[in-house]
Image (tube, helix red, strand yellow):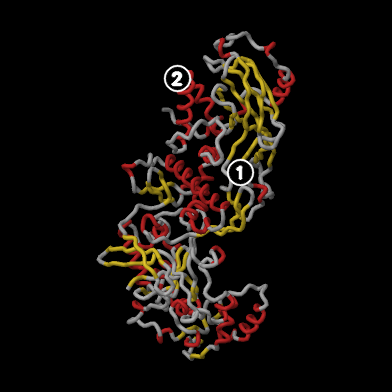
Amino acid sequence: MKNLNRETLLRDFGSAAFCLTMAFALLMMYSGCSEDNSPINGAHGGAAEEQGYYALAGRVGDVYPKLMVSADNADSSTYNSSVFVDKGSIVIVHELDSLTLDTTGRVFVDTVDNDSGHFAFENISLGSPYVLIENKVPYDSVLYIPRTEPSDDFYNPIVRVTKYKEYSAVVNLQTIKNVNVSVLTTAKVPLLQKYFAEGNSYAQASKMAEREILESFGIYEDLGSFEEMPEENSELYYVNKLAPMSKDEIQYDLETIGVTLAFASPKYFLMKGAAMERYYLNSMKMVGYEIGYLARLDSLGRCTESRENEAAEVKGLLNRNPVSVVCRSGKWTVGFKMIEHIKGSMTDNRDGKTYKTVTYNFGGTSQTWMAENLDFTDTTSLSIDSSLRANLLGGVDCYRKDMNDSTCGIYGHEYLWKAAMNIGTDDIKTYSVGPQQDSILVSKNCLDAYVNAYAVDPNYPEWGSVMDVADSCDALLNRGNDSVNVPTRTWTWNYTDFITPANQNSYQGICPDGWRIPTLEDWMTLLQNLGEQYGVDYGNVVPVLYDETATGFGMNSFAKILGVEVDHVIVQHFGLYNYFIMADASYYVAEFFNMWRYKSGFSLKFPDVWHVLVYKYNNPDQLTEWLQSNRAAPYEPGAVRCIKN
């Protein structure tokens, strides 16, 4: 079967007959069309019994699923779930010969008099049940004119030109009364005519044309007739949205929204109500169609049962960093091949909460991790709400506090390092160390001021008092001249009173009995073993932690939703970064993807310098001093993933 050229869907239909001026003339000519001016039965190829009157109603324009579009702090008026023809557009219906599908010369005209693209013909007399529906929509396009001589003007001169977007459809009125005329039906017309001319029946030619179009997008299922008015959230609406998109647009959408949405917690969207749930489900379905199309472009072939768990890649934007995909249940999806792991669960006896767990047995070692962030708080037994910073932030906050529910049940809690380690504020002593190794104990007042200078909103009343104290302590707390990066004073604190090489691998902290706070060595063991399973360096394997199906670890990305409009969601940003408390006092927090940015792919080839934990580990000379001299080290926040003893 001939492959459909994608550009066919986007070509300029300017060569088609009937411009709008002709349409108005035809409107005047045929507005009084009746049985008296009908052709003789069968004169144009139709059988005598096909002569009759038909009612025809439909809609012109592309329809997309509602609540699928996200607007990043954008004007909501620029986002619509449907693109219909403008009010006043002319709809032209051509009678077709039932034996050749050629136009007979019989034409009927109607005007769209509403904003939803609907048109209707109550009673048209035809000698054939087959018609061609056409609508030609003008729109302004900007043409940039190349300069022929040097100019100080930054922009190239432009000229606005009028172009036309044409919708069309071939319909059998014996089987379809309510027709949807869209970009898909427009692409189908020439293929339907081609297969019909080759001797296939109308029904066969119709199915062959639809199959060729769908397969050009990497879709191998029968999604129903293109021309029939689909039900709300029909699969064809997704293809309808995909069809006009360029490859770059699809790649950008996949990298910026699709990847992070694929690894976000579904609980977050479900708890936000029906509209957010619909947005999530629709968007995930659209991501699947985008991946299917890119998989076809990159010649991955069809995902079949025999290829289950086979891993591949689709090219990223501008063919740069790719996105990893895997064959699962007959569909290419964002993710990685599944490796051996054991899923389980544990219950925290302190509050009765149950957590998923995952066990790995690789490289002669066995590790069992919590597969969810810890969600425990008990202010009566743990020093978790001390220090000015913790109080201003409401004690132990939810991790992703502006994306969580009130119980922190989705992403768990966020703990200050000292709280996660169960170290009291009064037990912490911070020292300012001078060039001659003179150590000065920093008052709690000064330390709290500096900690909170970065935590308090400037609009809050506390801001002024915090900054006053910070300014008065500046000479004591200043590390040096940033312009030359020569520290005059460094920092240290009495962490060895609590954390020693002998106990850091068994430090329970806030974890349940039998579990402990992981160390850098624990994280590196995990990454190194996973790297061996996937055949890459440990610095490149971090993305697999997000694919719960592949590895069971279940690290989540996030989407910050600002609100829901009529047919779209307003999103502040999507992201992948995560940070976890470690027992190692010189590192404190393990960070992942804190340098992640848009248009960067998502695969095992992901640059390891964007995995901040690995970046720090691989550059100890550059960062160790900063890490060990961080004045706010005990106050560093993060989530907790406990590891089993």
| Residue bearing mark 1 | 81
Q: Which mark is residue 529?
A: none
Which residue is at a point 66% across and 43% down the rendered structure image? Answer: 149
| Residue bearing mark 2 | 200
Placement of 194 over or under 180, stated as above or below: above
Taking depth in this image into account, of 71 and 5 the one nearest to the observer is 71
The percent position of residue 213, horizontal first and vertical second, equals 48, 32
Q: What's the residue type where badge 1 is placed?
A: Ser
Q: What's the residue type where badge 2 is placed?
A: Asn
Q: Which quarter of the image is occupied by the C terminus? A: bottom left
The percent position of residue 106, horizontal first and vertical second, equals 64, 16
Which residue is at a point 60% across and 30% down the rendered structure image? Answer: 167
Placement of 596 over or under 237, stated as above or below: below
Locate residue 609: give its quadrant.
bottom left
Q: Secondary structure at mark 1?
A: loop
Which residue is at a point 32% across and 82% down the rendered structure image? Answer: 502
Q: Which quarter of the image is occupied by the N terminus? A: top left
Extreme-right residue of the structure:
28
Q: CA distance from mark 2 to mark 1?
A: 36 Å
The percent position of residue 610, horizontal first and vertical second, equals 45, 62
Placement of 524 over or under 223, stated as above or below: below
The percent position of residue 238, horizontal first and vertical second, equals 52, 41
Taking depth in this image into account, of 194 and 413 the one nearest to the observer is 413
